[in-house]
């Protein structure tokens, strides 16, 4: 039973608890046991939440008494350690915040609890949630459960590793340029970066640059991601970017009245892509075409006109540098890779910043045009599969690229705020997961959830787990 419980998804666990086939205490204990058994090798969990078993007993008692229960009643979940959690350490991947315990939950955390979820643990991240690997001076480095010598990605790498390893069925991550989608691809799970503002970021740090930060659910199945998204979306009256009613959706839904129009690409100005990654995208496109989706290879001229990574870098330095300089003042000996790199980067001139802003506007216009002709876009999540720890410059298809090149395929949709989903659809020759990314128009989450659900049924790797 414990093995079945740690590999069951949150939707199944909720049903098992609701129907009395298993107790919440049994489910929570199974995941606590899994953390104890596997976390020393992976270092995904950095803090266990006090009171999880007590909350599980209360959940079982409420169910026995016939009380109303939510869709996640009695199901454990984990949270990236950048979100505030009431009474539970929230240290943001830095010794500067060591011992910090918030009084209140972030909005997204509170919503998962309201749905009946039980906070199990906080998960690892890079310093201040900024880097392509989850490593920091305070809680160390997270290893990929598929290969401990490789990264689980960043910045939600602890969350992705915990879910992939069976320590958690459901998690909450955040995404600035790659941070829920890349780690999901690296560890073979599923994640959703909704339209910007769909999920309030209240209680998350840092907020700069506010226009690019997204909250996103992470899980092993599409249905779990869809369920969590439905619980998390909607204004909270505190985040000024979160204003769209939770029920609004501009997508096709689960039963489109015409064939879905899908474009796919593996280059289009995004730079070199690993051959196995490109082949997996093509395989996914072929699978969807075989399932009745109208598929064609496309290019997106806006991606060829402006380099999204360059736009992001120029915008990011201007907006984040003051926040990092302020929080690290007097703590220079506690700075790690990100803050040292950022503060050592030349300032962006006002003229370059304005040009970057205009470039982002052109990207938005280009995607608005694209989604007049297509319902969705299929492309790689990351340009390479999970990499070794400590990634620096690397050679891909004969070209030397920097470590942030892994995010060249995700950054465009953070800059433009488009919804994007990452899911596994392949495996490398040496046994590592390969993901694909689905993107839809603004507020059309139902379109990519529909396509992802269809693709999941066509996948040959759906029930594979790391051998731990």
Image (tube, rainbow, N blue to C red):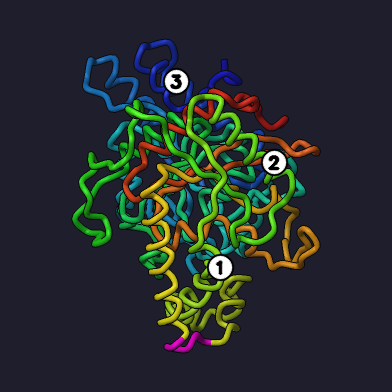
Q: Is 429 left, or right, of 97 in this rendering?
A: right
Q: Which mark is residue 153?
A: none
Is any part of residue 394 visible from this angle? yes
Tags 3 and 2 touching, CB below 8 Å:
no
Q: What residue does disc 3 label?
A: 12
Q: What residue does disc 1 label?
A: 309
The stretch in magenta equals 347-351
Identify the secondary structure beneath mark 2: helix
Which tag, 3 or 2, sits closer to the chain's start? 3
Answer with the quarter of the image where residue 281 lies.
Answer: top right
Q: What residue does disc 2 label?
A: 279
Query: Comparing marks 3 and 2, which lies closer to the viewer?
Result: 2
At 45% from the left and 59% from the top, the residue drawn is 414
Chief secondary structure of the magenta portion? loop
Q: Position of residue 327 (x, y in %)?
A: 45, 76
Image quarter hosting the N terminus: top right
Reply above or below: 341 against 234.
Answer: below
User: Marks 2 and 1, how far apart in space?
Assistant: 23 Å
């Amino acid at each position: 039973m414990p093995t079945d419980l740690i590999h069951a998804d949150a939707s199944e666990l909720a049903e098992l608890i609701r129907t009395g086939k298993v107790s919440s205490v049994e489910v929570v204990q199974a995941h606590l046991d899994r953390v104890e058994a596997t976390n020393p090798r992976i270092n995904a969990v950095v803090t266990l939440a006090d009171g999880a078993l007590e909350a599980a007993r209360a959940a079982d008692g409420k169910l026995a008494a016939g009380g109303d229960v939510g869709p996640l009643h009695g199901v454990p979940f984990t949270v990236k350690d950048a979100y505030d959690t009431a009474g539970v350490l929230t240290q943001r991947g830095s010794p500067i915040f060591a011992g910090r315990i918030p009084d209140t939950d972030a909005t997204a955390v509170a919503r998962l609890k309201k749905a009946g979820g039980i906070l199990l643990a906080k998960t690892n991240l890079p310093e201040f949630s900024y880097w392509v690997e989850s490593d920091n001076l305070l809680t160390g480095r997270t290893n990929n459960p598929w290969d401990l010598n490789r990264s689980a990605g960043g910045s939600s790498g602890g969350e992705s590793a915990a879910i992939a390893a069976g320590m958690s069925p459901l998690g909450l991550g955040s995404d600035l340029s790659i941070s829920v989608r890349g780690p999901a691809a690296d560890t073979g799970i599923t994640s959703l970066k909704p339209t910007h503002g769909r999920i309030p970021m209240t209680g998350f740090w840092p907020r700069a640059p506010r226009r690019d930060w997204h909250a996103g659910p992470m899980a092993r199945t599409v249905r779990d991601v869809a369920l969590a998204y439905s619980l998390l979306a909607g204004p909270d009256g505190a985040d000024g970017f979160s204003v769209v009613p939770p029920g609004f959706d501009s997508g096709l839904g689960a039963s489109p009245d015409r064939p879905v129009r899908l474009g796919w690409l593996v280059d289009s100005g995004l730079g070199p892509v690993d051959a196995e990654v490109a082949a997996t995208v093509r395989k996914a496109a072929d699978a969807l075409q075989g399932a009745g989706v109208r598929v064609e290879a496309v290019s997106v001229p806006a991606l060829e006109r402006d380099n999204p990574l360059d736009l992001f870098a120029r915008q990011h330095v201007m907006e984040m540098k003051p926040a990092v300089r302020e929080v690290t003042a007097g703590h220079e000996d506690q700075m790690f890779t990100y803050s040292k790199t950022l503060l050592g980067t030349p300032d962006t001139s006002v003229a370059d910043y304005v040009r970057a802003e205009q470039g982002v506007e052109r990207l938005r216009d280009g995607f608005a045009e694209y989604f007049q002709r297509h319902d969705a876009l299929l492309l790689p999540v990351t340009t390479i599969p999970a990499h070794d720890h400590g990634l620096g410059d690397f050679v891909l298809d004969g070209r030397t690229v920097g470590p942030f090149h892994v995010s060249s395929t995700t950054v465009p949709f953070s800059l433009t705020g488009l919804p994007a989903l990452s899911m596994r659809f392949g495996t490398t020759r040496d046994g590592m997961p390969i993901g694909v990314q689905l993107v839809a128009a603004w507020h059309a989450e139902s379109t990519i959830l529909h396509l992802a659900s269809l693709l999941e049924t066509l996948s040959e790797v759906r029930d594979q787990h790391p051998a731990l």
